Image: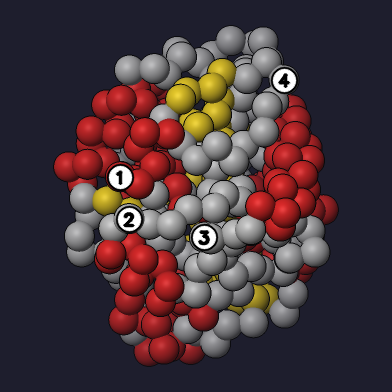
Amino acid sequence: MSTTRLQPLVLNVDGSVGPLDDETRLHLTDWQEAVRFGCTTRRYAAFRKAVEAQLPAEYGTALMGSGDFHHLSWLLMERCIASQGFSAGNPMRVVVLDNHPDNMLFPWGVHCGSWVRRVAMHPAVSHVHVAGITSQDIGAGHAWENYLAPLRAGKLTYWSCGVNTDWAARKKLDKGFRNFSSVTELSHALAQLLSKNQQPTYLSIDKDVFAPDVVRTNWDQGQMREEDSTAIIDALQGQIVGSDITGDVSSWRYATWWKRWLSASDGQDTEINAHELAASQVGQHAINERLVERIARCHMV
């Protein structure tokens, strides 16, 4: 990899990401309805082909817009694996900062809450840490919705706060669950682990991990402070081989009935008035700039 500062990459699917210094921007808005929230694997493969045809050989942090597009991390991580030669014998670690596990059942293809299983079970991925979870998605009431294969394989760990996960011990999965009394305590523990056990790492941030007074998203949000996230990022100094950010805000009404239904059942708000949207995007852009700069300092050279 080049030692020069890599340009941030914007996958412009929903128009929510503001301009960044020295960016590369791929224009993909025609795909918004097709891939937003979720899609069949066939449609995802077509989108992947369209993206890969435009990707530069090297790039820095990728910004993908709304958290509705977090499943695009899957194709970016596989691109990172292929381009940098990771394998079962030379694996890549993945760290995801997210208020949700993104490891939930979705039998119709892949969506923004189901992609982690596919990454965790990739032979070139050593482990996936999903950190900052305060969502009840990993609680007993939703236990049946979690893909258990990556937990059973010892390739996935949930780092959570304020969620009762006693069910995991009954299923002998408790090694994949780490619970903390505060997100700050969680962040310090994860930072210590990442600093001590260094290896090439892909970092993915969904800004719904942050408390609402840090930045506003259109999903239910966690409790992480910005300084908690920077402690984790700084612990990855010299280890980051790829990175992405989602959780921006955009307004959209799904044309597809099942997306409207599933989105509503998840408590998502995607139809936002123009004044509120503009105000949210100002804060979003500021934190994007800070995160991109911080991550860039920690990239492997």
Q: Earlier in the sequence, mark 4 or mark 2?
A: 4
The x, y position of residue 248, in whole percent, is: 61, 48
Give the mark toward the camera: 3 or 2. Answer: 2
Kind of residue indicated by mark 4: Asp
Kind of residue indicated by mark 1: Ala
* Residue under pointer 4: 21
Q: Quadrant of the C terminus?
A: top right
Q: Residue at x 50, y 68 (%)?
A: 268
Q: Secondary structure at mark 4?
A: loop
Q: CA distance from mark 3 to mark 1?
A: 16 Å
Q: Indicate left or right for 233 with 106 as reference.
A: right
* Residue under pointer 3: 270
Seen in the picture, residue 256 relative to 196 is either above or below; the reply is: below
Give the mark toward the camera: 1 or 2. Answer: 2
Which quarter of the figure has residue 167? bottom left
Per the rendering, the mark at residue 154 is: none
Q: Indicate left or right for 247 with 166 as reference.
A: right
Give the mark toward the camera: 4 or 3. Answer: 3
Per the rendering, the mark at residue 34 is: 1
Q: Secondary structure at mark 1?
A: helix
The number of discs equals 4
Q: Residue at x 36, y 66 (%)?
A: 260
Kind of residue indicated by mark 3: Thr
Q: CA distance from mark 4 to mark 3?
A: 28 Å
Q: CA distance from mark 3 to mark 2?
A: 12 Å
* Residue under pointer 2: 255
Q: Secondary structure at mark 2?
A: loop
Q: CA distance from mark 4 to mark 2?
A: 34 Å
